[in-house]
Image (tube, rainbow, N blue to C red):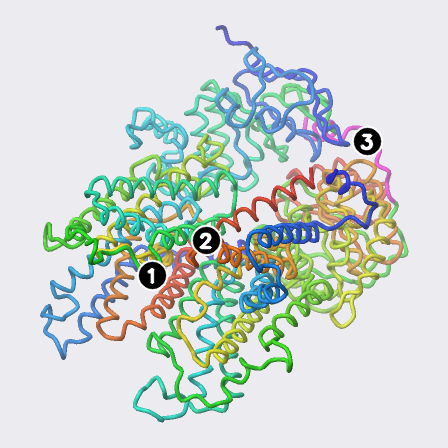
């Protein structure tokens, strides 16, 4: 079958294979640099390099990094889950629900820490629901998480009172002004706490992937399930933990989004699952699991954010969906060309 | 009692698993309907029943394509975006050339028939992109079709600048959407739905083509070794699914006399849900369009009963999710019991 | 505890499968720190025996003593903990992890979940490096050759302090020099208190590496003796095939000289320049042991796998594509019945006509009555045991499933029928029915190619016999009284 073709092909083209593997190592960095370069020279006739309105002006970079907080927070755990060969399409809705719940608590007089804690517990519960459906009831991951996508989103919509589009302050009951401190107030280098937390999360996820038993077992389960089972690894337990992590960080991303917008929008996480998939595919994680890198997913996340934010500076916002769709399909093609064949060699 | 009866019938009378699940879901439908009639006033009137069956014609039309794709073990999540794109294009193609200062009022000025033809071609084109990635590059269908969903909806947004196109349309544009059988309230879209169900039922049960779809879903490798060109059949199905989305898009645009870029959000999910409710197995090789139709009515009974019970429309997402889980688990339980 | 002389004692072991007794009252001992070889034809019961030892199967009756104590593993992991590791043919290493990560997989030492590099890890690495210094611990396993992956697995087994390592056909996919290296490793294992149970079809290897050998045949134990006491290959071969009187099939004289199939210089990653001709109406057998390339050859001819070379069918070049092959008049009964041949979730009626739908349909529409008639006809013709054609294929026994697959191929109306292991894993009754069916088909003028690892099967029904070893066609014989089964086994086990 395919395998046969591949082997003889690779036998003849051993050298180009090595080339491809080195392209695979560096291409994502090149893509990021290229995109940044393109956007920074694009309007040079109108604005000064690094000046006001330029893509790389301090304001613009800070804005870009602040927008990147949710995907940076979430995509690391998402990568680990995909490395283990599973998927969670409900992350966007989980984010929305968390944003709504968090905003609701703040509006009703909760202080920061209790509200955060409860939001994170909610994240763990959502992750557990997915894990239970997939691992214990054995519903196909795609179906199970598509349905929880609808479930979480539905609950978020139910929480928002009729007639309102989001949980937000009203003349009777004002949203406390400090709600956006977390995601907007400068803490270090002009960036807010939410960003630095996201950086910490990334560092933690990179360490988890490279240094801990969880990262290793995720790769073993996705790479060779039989070998993992024979080595006494409990796939059920590991994948449960991964789904919980994804739920937890989806909640954290949702809370950051609510804080950034000062309201709880039940649609604020829509499409996050696709952003995560794009970032993961750009980062070279194999569809089939086993192989992948959290660090490269981070670069992939930055690419998406650059493309969406950068495009908005040159073309109208309504191009965004089409741009993301194209990036996804391009990522699929790149992934196909670079990852798939070398992975099975 | 019930199990005894199931095991007794002489060979040949015994239902296939597929018909069993359809009958099982019809039973559930009757039950849900009876409950709704008890608690919701005016639920079982003829008019309401008619509405229950026909109001969601668009999801059912999509469901036909989605079900056939699902039987091969694949997804098509691009149908919602495809509807938006086709609707917007059908408007853009007929709008006059340079008739207004407003760019959203200017189009290509093509005759309506040509416009429809071209819009349908684009809808099939989206299906062709799906087919290329899935059948040729063997990329998981869920990822590809989520991508083309965004691509199609994104293109619709670009053409409408994120909103809609509804001006400088010729009168003929609304004709298809308002057409109905004289003297009745049966409109063209409903007619399309009914004929598609009948066609699909015959197709599914009688044709060699459909039989091969089931074979591919049941065991792709055995299908290949039995001389079935798997890529060819997958391609055909994605083209058909694209075409059905296109037809839906054109009819909806005509009915509302507008091409709206946010039209049909989430329809791909509804189409998937009714297929699952109707017993189509995501593992492939199992399910029927008739089952999907039953699933669609169950969903519409449940949602409309919920509205009747004064639940806010916001309940729909939660309700769909819960109903789907119950359906998946109860079908599995029923099949296991039957096999044991 | 004083170690017993025998590391493993097997007493009256029996394993029954529905309709078949796979292991029949087997008793023998395996001496500590020896290389104990296990030989026998396919279906002799070796694999079943190994699977009982490693906890994959549960025995029907009998006793196994490991170090003098009752041994009843629940699963392979359990067996491993009790000191029995296995190198399966499908290697169980994770390609995406490094060598070191694979070595410690499942036995990591951690602090708060962080992997620690401990003495134990270092020890594992040094065990591995003492076996094969060229493997670096940080290397990805996907970059290693099959032979080196085996070494990683051996190192894992050694580090797990296994006293028994079972190797199932370890040399099937590695080169000559790598085999020599493996043997050096096996010898040093033996010196380091490890008993190796070695299974191979290559008999020369038994003489080179084995201390003792157990021969099995038809599920029974034939002999266990020191290799030194065995005179030569032929003695071993005689024990393997026994006194089985082959019901020799006399090749027919009336085969037309017309060639229906010409295969020229067929090569791919498992096949090495194979050429042969098949006459119309002939029954041709390909015989070879596991890994000889039978399945690969069948799939290559059928167009299911890519290959180089030329295949002419009825004088015309075949396109490498099953759809085109079937249209041209070739059908294949694949090796793996359940995953490649059968649509298990469909009924018998749904399975039978799939390769020739045009015969039960008209302008694309299926004639349901005709479909039922056809299914019924084949159920009767092949004597498929079922009460209804509406029975799901999954619910049939192995033999009946195979008959459904055969029906499917027969209904394709092919002129050339290729059967890959047509009777594997099915009971004796169904077997003989399939043989008489093949004869009948041949009398009707069909050409048949059988790919089999069971010699009696080949000798009973074929007009000519091709012998495969290691992907090459080694010899071609005409069947008849003068065919020497010892010679055949000599060739297919790698003899000159």
A201 in magenta: no
In the picture of the structure, the residue carrying the numbered disc 3 is C244
Quick check: C333 left or right of B133? right
Mark whose residue sits in front, 2 or 1: 1
Q: Nearer the viewer, residue A280 or C469?
A: A280
Element at label 1: loop
Q: Nearer the viewer, residue B6 or A82?
A: B6
Quick check: C97 left or right of C4? left
C248 in magenta: yes
Where the C terminus of chain B falls, by quadrant?
top right
Q: CA distance from mark 3 to mark 1?
A: 88 Å
Quick check: C152 left or right of A96? right
How many numbered discs sit on the rendered protein? 3
Magenta region: which residues? C232-249
Q: CA distance from mark 2 to mark 3?
A: 61 Å
Q: Nearer the viewer, residue C227 or A147?
A: A147
What crowding class fits label 1: few (fewer than 14 Cα within 10 Å), some (14-19), or many (20 or more)?
Answer: few
Relative to C285, does residue A274 appear above or below in the rendering?
below
In the image, farthest residue toward the top = C2
Which chain's residue wears label 1?
A
- Is tag 2's residue or tag 1's residue first in the polypeptide sequence? 2
Relative to A108, does residue C47 appear above or below in the rendering?
above
In the picture of the structure, the residue carrying the numbered disc 1 is A163
Quick check: A322 left or right of B6? left
């Amino acid at each position: 079958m395919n395998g046969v073709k591949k082997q003889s092909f690779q036998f003849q083209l051993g050298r180009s294979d090595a080339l491809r593997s080195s392209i695979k190592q560096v291409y994502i960095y090149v893509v990021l640099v290229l995109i940044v370069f393109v956007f920074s020279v694009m309007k040079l006739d109108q604005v000064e390099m690094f000046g006001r309105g330029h893509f790389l002006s301090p304001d613009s970079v800070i804005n870009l990094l602040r927008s990147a907080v949710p995907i940076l927070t979430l995509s690391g755990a998402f990568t680990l889950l995909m490395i283990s060969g599973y998927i969670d399409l409900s992350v966007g809705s989980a984010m929305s629900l968390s944003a709504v719940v968090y905003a609701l608590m703040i509006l009703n007089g909760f202080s920061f820490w209790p509200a955060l804690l409860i939001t994170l517990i909610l994240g763990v519960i959502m992750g557990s629901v997915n894990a239970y459906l997939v691992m214990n009831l054995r519903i196909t991951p795609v179906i199970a998480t598509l349905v929880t996508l609808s479930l979480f989103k539905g609950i978020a919509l139910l929480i928002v009172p009729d007639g309102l589009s989001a949980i937000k302050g009203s003349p009777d009951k004002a949203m406390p002004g400090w709600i956006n401190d977390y995601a907007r107030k400068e803490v270090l280098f002009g960036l807010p706490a939410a960003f630095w937390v996201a950086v910490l999360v990334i560092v933690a996820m990179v360490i988890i992937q490279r240094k801990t038993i969880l990262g290793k077992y995720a790769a073993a389960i996705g790479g060779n399930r039989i070998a993992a089972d024979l080595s006494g690894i409990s796939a059920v337990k590991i994948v449960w933990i991964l789904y919980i992590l994804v739920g937890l960080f989806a909640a954290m991303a949702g809370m950051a989004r609510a804080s950034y917008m000062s309201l709880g929008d039940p649609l604020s996480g829509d499409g996050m699952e696709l952003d995560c998939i794009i970032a993961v595919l750009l980062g070279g994680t194999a569809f089939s699991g086993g192989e992948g890198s959290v660090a490269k997913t981070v670069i992939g996340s930055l690419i998406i954010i650059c493309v969406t934010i950068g495009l908005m500076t040159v073309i109208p916002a309504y191009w965004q969906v089409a741009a993301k769709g194209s990036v996804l399909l391009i990522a699929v093609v790149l992934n196909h060309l670079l990852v798939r064949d070398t992975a099975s060699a | 009692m019930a199990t005894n009866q199931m095991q007794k019938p002489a060979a040949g009378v015994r239902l296939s698993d597929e018909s069993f699940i359809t009958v099982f879901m019809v039973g559930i439908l009757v039950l849900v309907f009876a409950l709704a009639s008890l608690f919701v006033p005016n639920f079982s009137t003829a008019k309401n029943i008619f509405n229950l069956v026909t109001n969601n014609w668009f999801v059912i039309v999509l469901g036909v394509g989605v079900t056939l794709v699902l039987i091969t073990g694949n997804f098509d999540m691009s149908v919602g975006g495809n509807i938006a794109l086709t609707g917007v294009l059908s408007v853009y193609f007929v709008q006059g050339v340079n008739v207004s200062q407003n760019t959203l009022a200017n189009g290509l000025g093509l005759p309506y028939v040509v416009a429809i033809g071209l819009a349908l071609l684009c809808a099939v084109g989206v299906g062709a992109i799906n087919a290329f990635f899935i059948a040729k590059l063997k990329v998981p269908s869920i990822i590809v079709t989520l991508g083309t969903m965004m691509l199609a909806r994104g293109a619709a947004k670009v053409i409408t600048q994120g909103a809609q196109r509804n001006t400088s349309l010729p009168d003929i544009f609304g004709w298809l959407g308002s057409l109905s059988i004289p003297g009745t309230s049966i409109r063209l879209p409903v007619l399309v739905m009914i004929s598609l169900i009948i066609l699909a039922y015959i197709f599914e049960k009688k044709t060699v083509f459909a039989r091969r779809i089931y074979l591919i879903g049941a065991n792709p490798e055995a299908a290949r070794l039995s001389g079935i060109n798997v890529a060819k059949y997958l391609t055909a199905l994605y083209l058909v699914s694209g075409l059905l989305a296109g037809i839906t898009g054109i009819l909806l645009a005509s009915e509302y006399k507008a091409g709206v870029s946010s039209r049909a959000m989430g329809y791909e999910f509804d189409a998937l849900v009714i297929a699952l409710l109707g017993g189509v197995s995501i593992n492939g090789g199992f399910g029927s369009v008739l089952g999907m139709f039953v699933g669609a009515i169950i969903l519409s009974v449940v949602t409309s009963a919920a509205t009747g019970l004064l639940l806010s429309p916001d309940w729909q997402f939660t309700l769909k999710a819960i109903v789907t889980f119950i359906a998946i688990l109860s079908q599995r339980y029923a099949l296991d019991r039957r096999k044991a | 505890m004083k170690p017993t002389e025998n590391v493993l004692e097997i007493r009256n072991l029996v394993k029954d499968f529905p309709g078949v007794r796979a292991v029949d009252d087997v008793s023998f001992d395996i001496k500590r720190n020896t290389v104990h070889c296990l030989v026998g034809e396919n279906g002799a019961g070796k694999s079943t025996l190994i699977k009982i030892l490693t906890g994959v199967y549960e025995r029907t009756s009998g006793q196994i003593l490991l170090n003098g104590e009752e041994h009843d593993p629940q699963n392979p992991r359990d067996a491993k903990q009790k000191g029995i590791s296995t190198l399966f043919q499908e290697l169980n290493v994770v390609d995406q992890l490094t060598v070191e990560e694979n070595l410690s997989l499942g036995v990591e030492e951690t602090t708060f979940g962080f992997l620690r590099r401990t003495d134990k890890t270092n020890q594992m690495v040094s065990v591995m490096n003492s076996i094969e210094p060229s493997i670096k611990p940080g290397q990805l396993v996907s970059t290693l050759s099959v032979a080196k992956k085996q070494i990683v697995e051996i190192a894992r087994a050694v580090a797990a302090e296994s006293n028994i390592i079972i190797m199932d056909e370890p040399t099937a996919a590695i080169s000559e020099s790598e085999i020599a290296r493996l043997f050096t490793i096996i010898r040093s294992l033996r010196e380091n208190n490890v008993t190796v149970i070695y299974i191979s079809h290559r008999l020369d290897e038994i003489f080179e590496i084995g201390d003792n050998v157990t021969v099995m045949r038809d599920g029974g134990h034939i002999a266990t003796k020191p290799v030194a006491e065995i005179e030569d290959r032929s003695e071993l071969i005689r024990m393997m095939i026994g006194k089985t009187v082959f019901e020799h099939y006399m090749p027919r004289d009336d085969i037309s000289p017309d060639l229906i199939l010409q295969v020229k210089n067929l090569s791919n990653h498992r096949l090495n320049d194979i050429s042969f001709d098949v006459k119309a109406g002939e029954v041709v057998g390909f015989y070879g042991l596991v890994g000889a390339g039978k399945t690969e050859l069948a799939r290559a001819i059928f167009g299911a796998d890519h290959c180089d070379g030329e295949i002419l069918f009825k004088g015309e070049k075949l396109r490498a594509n099953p759809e085109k092959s079937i249209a041209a008049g070739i059908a294949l009964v694949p090796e793996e019945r359940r995953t490649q041949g059968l649509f298990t979730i469909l009924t018998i009626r749904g399975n039978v006509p799939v390769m020739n739908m045009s015969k039960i349909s008209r302008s694309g529409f299926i004639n349901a009555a005709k479909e039922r008639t056809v299914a019924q006809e084949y159920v009767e013709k092949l004597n498929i045991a079922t009460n209804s054609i509406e029975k799901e294929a999954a619910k049939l026994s192995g033999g009946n499933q195979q008959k459904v697959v055969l029906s499917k191929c027969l209904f394709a109306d092919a002129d050339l029928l290729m059967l890959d292991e047509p009777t594997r894993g099915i009971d004796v009754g169904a077997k003989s029915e399939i043989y008489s069916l093949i004869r009948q088909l041949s009398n009707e003028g069909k050409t048949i190619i059988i790919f089999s690892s069971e010699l009696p099967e080949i000798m009973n029904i074929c007009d000519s016999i091709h012998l495969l070893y290691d992907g090459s066609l080694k010899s071609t014989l005409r069947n008849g009284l003068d065919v020497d089964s010892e010679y055949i086994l000599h060739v297919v086990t790698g003899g000159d």
